[in-house]
Amino acid sequence: MKRAAVIGLGDISSIHINAIQSNPDITLAAVCDIDESRKEAAPEGVPFYTDYKTMIEEVKPDVVHVCLPHYLHVPVTEVAVEMGVHVFCEKPMALNAEEGRQFVAFEAAHPEKHIGICFQNRFNESVEMLKSIIDSGEYGKVQGAKGVVLWARPKSYYEAKPWRGKWATAGGGCMINQSIHTLDLLYFLCGPIDSLKAVTGQVLDYGIEVEDTVTARLQFAGGAKGLFSATVANYKNESVQLSVQLEGAEFAIIDNVLYRLMPDGTQQRLVEDARLEGSKFYYGASHSKLIKKFYDAIEQGTQDYVHVSEALMSIRLIDAIQESGRTGKEVKL
């Protein structure tokens, strides 16, 4: 039985807490938030702390879940690891590629502790099947790929938590916060990306620093071409769309269902993702799968989870897209 603690009781923490409490092999030993009013949101009977170092010292959890604003992910994770604790950290893995590379070096210097990054969408049923199809080579090589994220965030979203709209604390806007999972899946499924050219900007009048809309053309190392587009200026949150063209077949994930797109225009339904109940269905339902995988790896001494080093490319891509948006030029990776 592993003992878990959660640092940060913001929006995403409830997903982690539910995953922990639904796993009979994990005990939620404590939660922590600097805002003492959050104590009301803590599960009944679970100790609440306002200082995570004190919590770790007194509770001695096996794992802490870092569910904090982006700028705190790396420093809090590093302190927890140095205090002898495994860490499961929400995305993004870092604010930018420079911090990300330093984090990778930190992970390599602490092989005795597991540090997992929460890219749970890799474990959606649709993605797992599509990955298997691509890797099998049955339909040939990847020729093209597309990822589209059309979400909506009101101005109050940034006003309620101002860190979300600032470079220094968020590291970016709609990419690093809302669509980083889709960027991760594009290279996870289709392989390394050699170069890209992008347009980034703001179409909303929110007075924030970071981008709210982006479109990027991707050139994959294997020769495939790709398109990535994301915004929080849509009128509602729609399901993420991801499609992959192979030499002999085309596949698409639409409304959390994987289809094979047939030449006659019909769609062959292959598998549907498990659904997350509630208004935030678009988070996906694979947190529990990845969290279980992470705890199993700790228990068995294996490495079967998403490492810091595996997550670095997502931040490198975001940096490259931002650079291309600023300069108007193609950026090599």
Image (spheres, grey):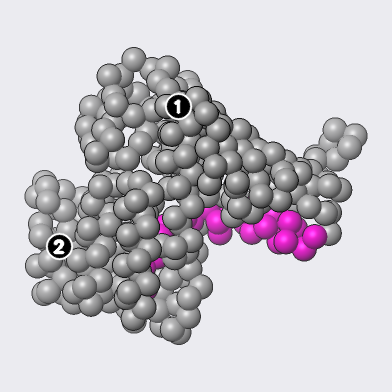
The region drawn magenta spans: 114-137
Q: Which residue corresponds to mark 1?
A: 327
Residue 120 marker: none
Q: Is residue 51 left or right of residue 106?
A: left
Which of the 4 image quadrants contains residue 250? top right
Q: Position of residue 60 (x, y in %)?
A: 18, 77
Q: Is residue 202 left or right of residue 247?
A: left
Which residue is located at x 47 percent, y 39 percent?
A: 320
Give the SS element for disc 2.
Answer: helix
Can you give x and y, in whole percent of width and height, for residue 193 in the image? 60, 47
Q: Nearer the viewer, residue 40 or 104?
A: 104
| Observer-nearest of 156 and 46 | 156
Q: Residue at x 9, y 50 (%)?
A: 36
Instruction: Residue at 32% x, 59% y: name it.
Output: 102
- Say which residue label 2 marks: 52
Q: Examine the rendering and report whether any part of residue 107 can be seen.
A: yes
Q: Which circle's residue, 1 or 2, is located before the other in the chain?
A: 2
Horizontal and vertical percent position of residue 57:
12, 74
